[in-house]
Amino acid sequence: MERLAKSAHTGHPWRVHDVASDFEVEDVWAFRVPGAGPDDFRAVLEAVRSAGGIDRMSPPVRFLFAVRWRLGALFGWDDPESGVDVRKASIRHRLPDDLRTAPRGPDHASMPLKAVYETDTEALRELVNRTAHALMHLGWVPTDEGGHELRMAVLVKADGRLGRLYMAAIAPFRHLIVYPALGRQWERAWAERDRVAERRDERGGS
């Protein structure tokens, strides 16, 4: 995986630009998916989902999230009244008709980010709490070498001074621990996708 300049996201004609122009791009990363072709975006998303959530990440990442959830419970950052369409309206209300009726992709209880839309080349998820309204955008981009790569952009609208301080405080942990671990997990999931599919078929046939 590789960290990219913000222009790698802002300079691409993604649909998300039309609905999230007031969000700030925090991070952009590229993930290696060797052998993937132009029509494999949904296959890559399925491999990423098969990798599991936070509970299957490395011990340092699980520890950081455990601390974050503990702090959130202590200060009420993640209370139900702070969520999507309660504290802040979902970004879904801004979508044009074709994206609003497009498939969203599945949600999982272990993942706090909830699906907004999914197309053949991009997918969007969102999270709302008392620190920020955050979006995770996944996009499918051709490379100069003739292949394709998965790009992840994190877009944020910080919630006041608390949100700005929070985003600044967690930046080193995101860049040095969380995203590199996520990249290894996703890239490994793509490399092992055939074996995962075989095990799934075996369980379904038993």
Image (cartoon, rainbow, N blue to C red):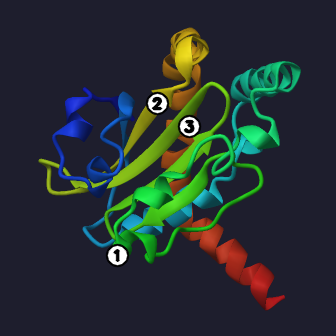
| C-alpha gap between disc 3 and disc 1 | 31 Å
Residue 98 image-quadrant placement? bottom left
Q: Is mark 2 on a helix, strand or loop?
A: strand
| Residue 192 seen in the current view | no
Q: Mark 3 points at which residue?
A: 182
Q: Where is residue 33 in the image (x, y as percent from the top left)?
A: 37, 53
Q: Nearer the viewer, mark 3 or mark 1?
A: 1
Q: Position of residue 88 (x, y in %)?
A: 59, 42
Q: What residue type is labelled 1?
A: Asp
| Residue 4 seen in the current view | yes
Q: Which amino acid does label 3 sit on?
A: Leu
Q: Position of residue 83 (x, y in %)?
A: 69, 43
Q: In this view, does 186 lie to the left or right of 69?
A: left
Q: What residue type is labelled 2?
A: Lys
Q: Name the residue under label 2.
A: 157
Of the numbered discs 3 and 2, the one sitting upstream in the chain is: 2
